[in-house]
Image (cartoon, helix red, strand yellow):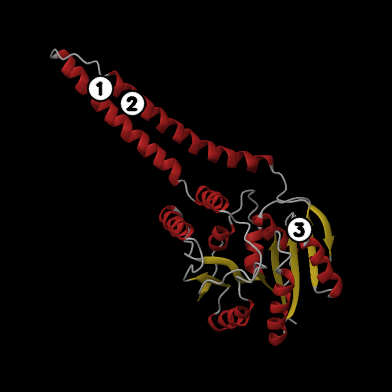
Amino acid sequence: MTLLSIVVPCYNEEETLHLYYDATVKVLNEMNMDHEFIFVNDGSRDRTLEIMKELHDAHPGEIKVINFSRNFGKEAGFLAGLEHAKGDYITVMDADLQDPPEYLPKMFETMEKNGDDIVGSRRVTRKGEPKIRSFCARTFYKLINRFSEVEIVDGARDFRLMKRQVVDAILSLREYNRFSKGMFVWVGFKAEYLEYENVERVAGETSWSFWKLFRYALDGIIEYTNAPLRASVWVGGFLTAIMLIELIVLLIMSLTGHVFSNTAIILSFILFLAGVILLALGIIGEYLAKTYDEVRKRPHYIIKDYYD
């Protein structure tokens, strides 16, 4: 019988786990699908691990629990779940039910009908989201798709159904700094996206603050495009040309008898250039830091407990 592996990374999801499990199992039973859940506890500080163990004990053979030694981040949770998944098909879902389980049958139907390797989901609305966050998200997709070699679908969720071959290809990418939204696209394969309106969390609060999302977006831009480096080169070259022209003009004017004492203007230019230089160094530093992470070759995560 075909096996479906469901990877569920969790951080402080004690209020949603039972609700998520009940809703998803109901759909799977209607599909008559053999399945396994792989819950990954990413260093939660509430009762998430205890509830995972309760579900594991109550449903032997159906649920695997991976407990990290600390919080390693959602990308590490994805990777651990995919590495332990044994299914012919694999899906990644959030436990807050923002990824509707009732879309799973439609994903399978679409995959079989159109011969897709990946069937993903994308939000067509951001109802319930702060306006500033929605604006920044749309801006991020525009920027990364303008300069990156891969096109990331605006509003695409991590919730997607993948064939075994796709997951094996993703696992072959061993870089330390991982950006799954880009990886899903970079490996290629035939993909299709199902559209749905935004669904708010069934319970609890999101752990994704604005700054965490901003940092995640910045990591994605750095991972999949060299645009910031190129921008710093162009800005530096433009300002150098402007300053060279200014120096020539000042030299010519001084030779014709003009006297200059505009110290404030000169200092302003110096400070402005210093700021540009620091900005460029900061961009270069981000890329060097990513390179340093890759060279160290530390593990993506450390498992403290594993319940099979």
Please indicate whether residue 242 sits to the left or right of residue 304 in the image.
Answer: left
Check disc 1 and report the residue beneath it: 247
Check disc 2 and report the residue beneath it: 268
The N terminus: image quadrant: bottom right
Sequence order check, earlier mark of 1 and 2? 1
The C terminus: image quadrant: bottom right
- Mark 3: secondary structure: loop
**Camera-side residue: 295 or 277?**
277
Counting from the top left corner in percent of width and height, residue 256 is at 13, 14
Residue at 25% from the left image edge and 19% from the top image edge: 262
- Identify the amino acid type marked 1: Leu
Picture disc at residue 46: 3
Quarter of the image where one finds residue 96: bottom right
Label 2: few (<14), some (14–19) or many (≥20) C-alpha neighbours in 10 Å: few
Q: Is residue 3 above or below residue 287?
A: below
Sequence order check, earlier mark of 1 and 3? 3
Q: Is residue 71 above or below residue 99?
A: above
Quarter of the image where one finds residue 232: top left
Label 3: few (<14), some (14–19) or many (≥20) C-alpha neighbours in 10 Å: few
The answer to whether residue 86 of the structure is visible from this angle is: no
Residue furthest to the left in view is 256
Q: CA distance from mark 1 to mark 3?
A: 63 Å
